[in-house]
Amino acid sequence: MPRGGLRDSRGKKSKKGQRRHFTDEEALKNEEQKLEREKNWRRQQGEGESDEEEGAGATSSRKKDGSGSSSSSDSSSDEEEEKKSKGVEGFIEVANPNRSVKQAKKVTDIDTGHKTVLSRREREELEKTEAKKKYDQLHMEGKTTEAQADLARLALIRKQREEQAKKRDEERKELENKKKQVASSKGKS
């Protein structure tokens, strides 16, 4: 091992291989008791904490102790005491929007009369799809210029195919006539 401890690729000192420090149960219990004494002293002095802070402290102490019971005298004395606000808290009501509880709405309370307001993109997208549907309908009916051009092109192709079919029929008939003439001339000779 190099002098000064392990170092990683960036040259920083690594924590691996060092001793681990653990806190024993007695020290944790002593700290918890100290916090309880401070809370009680604050209550006696009139510097009451908010219910949320006390509740969080009580639940964390219960988790650490492993006991699920809390003293009923503490909860009854908390309810009896009035909360004293610190500083400007009493003058200004502050509501945290992130903490607000969302209430479920009843079906009867929902207003279905108003129209939903669409964004510009949504509105343009709807208009575009409606215009495409309308264009497709007109195209199927043959009322658009493209449809008329397509129909004219199809008519020309049909005429050409009919003419080619007639030519093939005539050529086939001529070939049959030639074969008959050849066969009849062979029969005469």
Image (cartoon, rainbow, N blue to C red):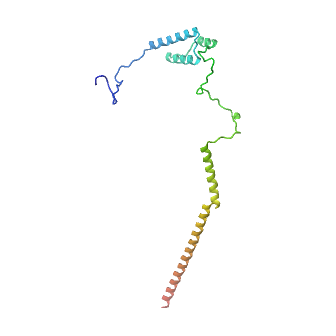
144 and 39: which is toward the camera: 144
> Which residue occupies 44% across, 12% down?
27
Left or right: where does residue 85 sit relative to residue 16? right
The residue sitting at the left extreme is 2
Left or right: where does residue 33 sit relative to residue 6? right
The vertical placement of 31 against 163, above or below, is: above
For the N terminus, the image quarter is: top left
The vertical placement of 18 against 108, above or below, is: above
Q: Position of residue 106 (x, y in %)?
A: 68, 32
Give the image quarter of residue 95: top right
Q: Position of residue 125 (x, y in %)?
A: 60, 47
> Which residue occupies 57% across, 19% down?
52
120 and 185: which is toward the camera: 120
The vertical placement of 101 against 74, above or below, is: below
> Which residue occupies 58% across, 71% down?
159
Q: Where is residue 162 in the image (x, y as percent from the top left)?
A: 58, 73
Give the image quarter of residue 156: bottom right
186 and 116: which is toward the camera: 116
Give the image quarter of residue 71: top right
